[in-house]
Image: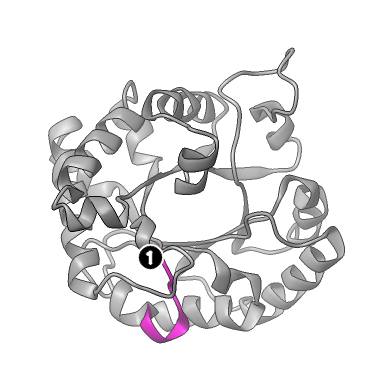
Amino acid sequence: MNKERKLIIAGNWKMNKTVAESLALVDDLNRDLAAVKEVDIVVCPPFTALESVSKAILESKNIKLGAQNMSENNFGAYTGEICAGMLKEFSVRYVILGHSERRQYQKETDALIAKKALAVHGAALKPIVCVGETLAEREGNLTEKVLDTQVRGSLAGLSKEQAVETVIAYEPVWAIGTGKTATTQQAQDAHAFIRGLLVQIFDAPTAKKMRIQYGGSVKPANAKELMSQPDVDGALVGGASLEARSFADIIKNSI
C-alpha cells in the first residue's frame, strides 16, 4: 500500500436505497468498519437519504458523508437542483462530480464540471472528479487523449491548494457495472498518466499529494492488487458498495 497518500474508498450508491434501506446498510457499516483507521471511508447515498445517513454516522469516527452531485449555483431559481448550502446542512464532506453516467445522460461537460468543482471548494467541501474513457475510445487508442481533455477541462481554474483537496476518480466507462475490470497494469498506467498531467497542470509537489481513485467493478477479490499499485490511492465503488459485507471487505482487503 502507498503510505504516502492515505487511501480513500467511497461508495456511490447511485439511484438505489430507500431511507430505511440506507439506514440498515449504514448500521452494518458502522459495525463492520469501526476499527478501520487506515482508510478514508465515504458513503454517497441518494439525496433523499442524506439527512438520515448523516445522523446515523454522526458518532462514527471514520465514515464520512458524500453527495452524488451538486449544482454550480447557490440558492436560487434552479428547479430540481441541490446547492452546497443544502449539502452542508447534513455535514456532507465530499461531492462526486462528472460521473460518466451524468456525462452521458445529463450531457455534463468538462466546463460545467470545472464550475461545479470551484463551487464545491468555495463551500469548503471536497470534490471527487470522475474521468474515464469509453470502450470505443480505448479500442481506438484514444485513452490518453480523452483523459488529457477531461482532466484539464474538469480541473480548470483550481488553485494548487484546491487541487490538493480534490480527489480524481479514474473510471474506465467500459468497466462500470459490466463486471469487466481494467487489469492492474491498465489501471496503474492510466493513474500514472493522470498524475503526469497533474504535474503539468499544477506542479510535481501538488501532483504527489493528490489522490487518484480507481472505479470500475471493484470487488473484494481484486481490491488488494489494485490498491497496491503506486498511483492507485483508493476506489470509487458502485454496485459492491450496496451490500455491507462486500464494501467492508473491499476496504479491509485494501489495507
Instruction: Single out the residue that lies furthest toward the right.
Output: 20
Residue nearest the observer in this picture, 246 or 231: 246
Q: Is residue 255 visible?
A: no
Tell me the quarter of the picture where residue 233 sits. Answer: bottom left
Residue at the image position 21 percent from the left and 56 percent from the top: 138
Which residue is farthest top? 77
SS class, disc 1? helix
In the picture shown, does residue 5 fall above or below 207? Answer: below
What is the magenta range?
Answer: 216-222
Q: Name the image quarter holding the C terminus.
A: bottom left
Residue located at (37% from left, 73% from top) = 180
Residue drawn at x 35%, y 32% as measured from the top left = 154
Residue 110: x and y, percent?
Answer: 37, 29
Residue 157 in the image: state x and y as whole percent. Answer: 33, 20
Disc 1 residue type (three-letter): Ala
Which corner quadrant of the image does residue 88 belong to? top right
Q: Is residue 74 visible?
A: yes
Q: Quadrant of the N terminus?
A: bottom left
- Label 1 sits on residue: 175
Q: Is residue 198 left or right of residue 105?
A: left
The answer to whether residue 62 is magenta is: no
